[in-house]
Image (cartoon, rainbow, N blue to C red):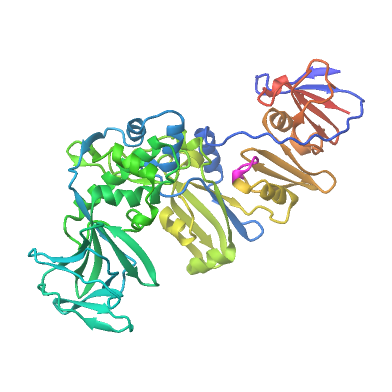
Amino acid sequence: MEKRLQHEGEDVQPVVRFTCRVLAGVIAAGLGFGLLGAPAANAAQAAAESTVKPVNSTITIVTSGWGHGIGMSQYGAYGAAKAGLSFTQILNFYYPGTTQAKLSASEKIDVLISKANDEKLYFYPASGVTITDTSGKKKVLPVGTKYTLWRIHRSGTQRLLYYKNDLGKYVKYDSGLSATKEWFVSNTKTNTVKLLLPGSVKRTYRGEMTLRFSGNGAVVVNRVLMEDYLRSVVPAEMPASWSLEAVKAQAVAARSYAARYKKNLNGKKPYDICDTTSCQAYTGISVEHANTDKAIKQTAGVILKYKDTIAYTMFSSSNGGYTAKGDYPYLVAKADPYDDKMLNQYKLVTLTTAAIEKKFTTIGKFQSMTFKRDGLGPWGGRVTEVKLTGAKGSKTVSGSSFKSAFGLRERLMIALGGLSTNSENYARWAKDKNVNGTIGVPTTSEKVIGAGLHAQFTGGDLFWTKTTGSKLLSGAILQAYLAEKGPSGKLGWPTSDVGTIKVVKVSDIKSGVEAYFEKGLITCPSKTAKPAQCVVSYG
């Protein structure tokens, strides 16, 4: 007997056939489909799950992306370059409304060497090493076995120069320079200076080094040509092996960012920019690479401007498929198809109730958390506020503060009750490379249904009972199964994953996909078919 069922006036149900044949066999071949292409659906889901309670004393956080998500996504630039976009097109996508301009080839930037945090400048002797004071007076420093290391340090309002001899003793050296003027250390032959930094770290930098007074102390600053500065920054910020067009986009973004940072400080600090990821990573010549040098040379001096001002070209590793809104008209929030085609850098973190209670002691025993979002992007957008509720009260923190408190990668996140980490569904998902595998990202907490467990993911659903084990359903098979009320329906629990049809059991479906169940079979002409095209057979 055969009938076609109706649902809300639409032909969405699969064909149902009642048969007495015995079904057997298990075919394992998991099928997956993506998440971030449907932000509207995810926004609705996020609203329904905005308040989350712990399961098994844990909360599961899944983030997508890595960084603040504002401006250019580096993975997105990589994806755009693979899609054939030029560096100009990449920049136009991530910084709409900006135009290209050029800096002078002689533009320099003063970079704080943050690791030199002992208020002294140590540098190695080499032929050509010269100290020049701001009056223009120079001193070429001697070399030889007697001189193993040089040191400049502050004494009141003066700078003093010492060398370390072959016996390991520091000896004061009279350079003949003005001790009250600023000194610049350079090498007239190599244009590099090799420093000794705390922790016995040795790094070589291009340009000049100076010990610049700051308050009652001193900081080490590298004055370097902008183009030479970029030779260290670009490969530190983006893999040099990536497509040249992506690296060129990074070079322009980094150059613009540095120039804007310098403009913003405008001499308010003894440097123009720092050397950490809080500004841009900069570690000297050790990371320089031919491919990034080529990208810098081919975009020499190019920066982005918005109207008459250098653009604040923020960038991050990955935006998870949707850029975040910044403070300027060219830092817009929008879907990013180029980053979305990458891995999206999903990351799962399990937070215990004890860890949450330790961070937020005033709430007492943790009971739930509620996310407030900006409404822009997957899962309802980035988290702007988190309300943590406990037995003693609640506390609301910003999304950024919550992110920092637990070392999360992004504010583009979803919170779930803890997955049942001792379940076979969890074990199978973990074996599948967690969030970057075929099964994908969890979208709800694992649910108990009768004698089994049901866990939903972006790449399909896992169903488990002690007798059937953990089985993966996805695509048309999953939709047809859910239309038949899933494990609570007449089919019972799945006994196989979705697999391609090996033996035809439904006369009008010769090829496609199928899955077996305790009390039947679902067959579909393809994994992307509509449920109404599928056939459910009982027996």
Q: Is residue 116 left or right of residue 394?
A: left
Is 438 one of the magenta-colored residues?
Answer: yes
Say which of 114 and 105 sits in front.
105
- What residue is at 80 percent from the left and 37 percent from the top? 496
Image quadrant of residue 53?
bottom right
Residue farthest left in this picture = 135
Q: Disc count in the image?
A: 0
- Position of residue 503 measured from the top left corner of the image (x, y, whole percent): 84, 24
Q: Is residue 53 left or right of residue 284?
A: right
- Position of residue 115 measured from the top left corner of the image (x, y, whole percent): 34, 67
Kindly tell me whether residue 539 is visible in this rendering.
Answer: yes
Tell me if residue 479 comes above or below residue 154 in the rendering: above
- What residue is at 55 percent from the left and 40 percent from the top? 45
Say which of 532 and 476 sits in front.
476
- What residue is at 16 percent from the left and 79 percent from the top? 156
Is 182 one of the magenta-colored residues?
Answer: no
Main structural element of the magenta stretch: helix, strand or loop? loop
- Position of residue 31 measured from the top left corner of the image (x, y, whole percent): 68, 34
Image quadrant of residue 290?
top left
Quadrant housing the N terminus:
top right
Region of the chain picked out in magenta, as a range: 436-443
Say which of 445 and 176 sits in front.
176
Residue farthest front in this picture = 144
Say which of 125 and 389 sits in front.
125
Image quadrant of residue 123?
bottom left
Tell me if residue 200 comes above or below residue 302 in the rendering: below
Tell me if residue 27 comes above or below residue 313 in the rendering: above
Tell me if residue 82 comes above or below residue 269 in the rendering: above
Quadrant housing the C terminus:
top right
